Amino acid sequence: MVTLRLTGNPEADELLSDDPLALLIGMVLDQQVPLEWAFAGPAELRRRLGRDLDAKEIAAMDPEALAGVFSAKPALHRYPGSMAARVHELCRVLVDHYGGRADGVWTAVTSGTELFDRVRRLPGFGEQKARIFVALLGKQLGVRPPGWQEISAPYGDPDTHRSVADITDQSSLDLVRSFKQDMKAKNKKAAPVKKAAPVKKAAPRRRARCRQPRSCRVGAG
């Protein structure tokens, strides 16, 4: 059994390694917050619910109740309401299409393309996040259908430190964070500078025309 090391918290990492639903939820939460916070979220969610994570139970919850669990201080995410809704919808899809089993997303797939398509259709997964997750499955969890590296490129490329798929310890975490910071700086530098819109000169005010007869105007002789 491979133990993922994404959070710095042994309990949270063990849950990610043992529970496919926790791993999917952590990936959904990995947005606009530090990745350690995102991937520690499933363990905290389990603690707040008071039981193991279960897609069928979460899907059956009242969405507002789940949002309340996410929003309880300290909030489980920077955007607790929207993330609660995504996790709720994720679990509904898992129930409807995979019998409530999160690992049903990647078991019995016959190609990397099929795996990528399955992941990309999940709520909270865009194209880039789907590639990263396929790379994570392949690099660390041994889910390697034919073509998985090609479909997950560049995140599936060997000997890289681009994403969570490459994190195995603190050193690799630092390298991934450094890579992301460098990419952010390059993108910011390459972004075109918006020119300020020219200031329009105010049109000269026109003197109001007197509509009175000339004989009635002040000073008229």
Image (tube, helix red, strand yellow):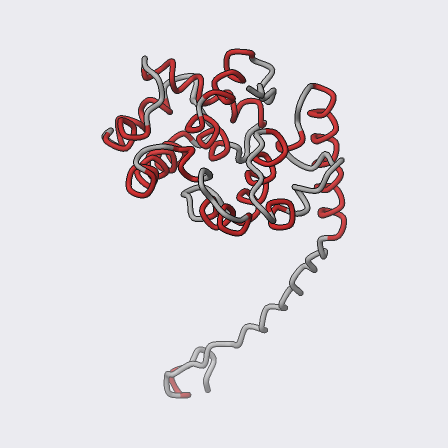
Residue 85 point in image, percent of width and height = 35, 36
Q: Residue at x 75, y 52 (%)?
A: 190
Which quadrant of the view contains residue 76?
top left
Which residue is at a point 53% across and 52% down the rendered structure image?
113
Residue 127 against residue 133 in the figure, above or below: below
What is the x, y in percent for residue 216? Answer: 38, 83
Residue drawn at point x = 55 percent, y = 42 percent: 129
The image position of residue 163, as x and y in percent, is 65, 35
Quarter of the view holding residue 53 = top left
Instruction: In this rendered view, identify the residue nearer to me: 74 or 62.
Output: 62
Q: Is residue 184 above or below residue 26?
A: below
Left or right: 142 in relation to 15: right
Quadrant for the N terminus, please.
Answer: top right
Q: Quadrant of residue 70?
A: top left
- In this picture, residue 58 sits left or right of residue 39: left
Total label count? 0
Residue 50 shown left or right of residue 170 in the figure: left
Please provide percent x and percent y for residue 18: 47, 20
In the displayed structure, 207 sits above or below 114; it is: below
- At x 39%, y 20%, the residue is 45
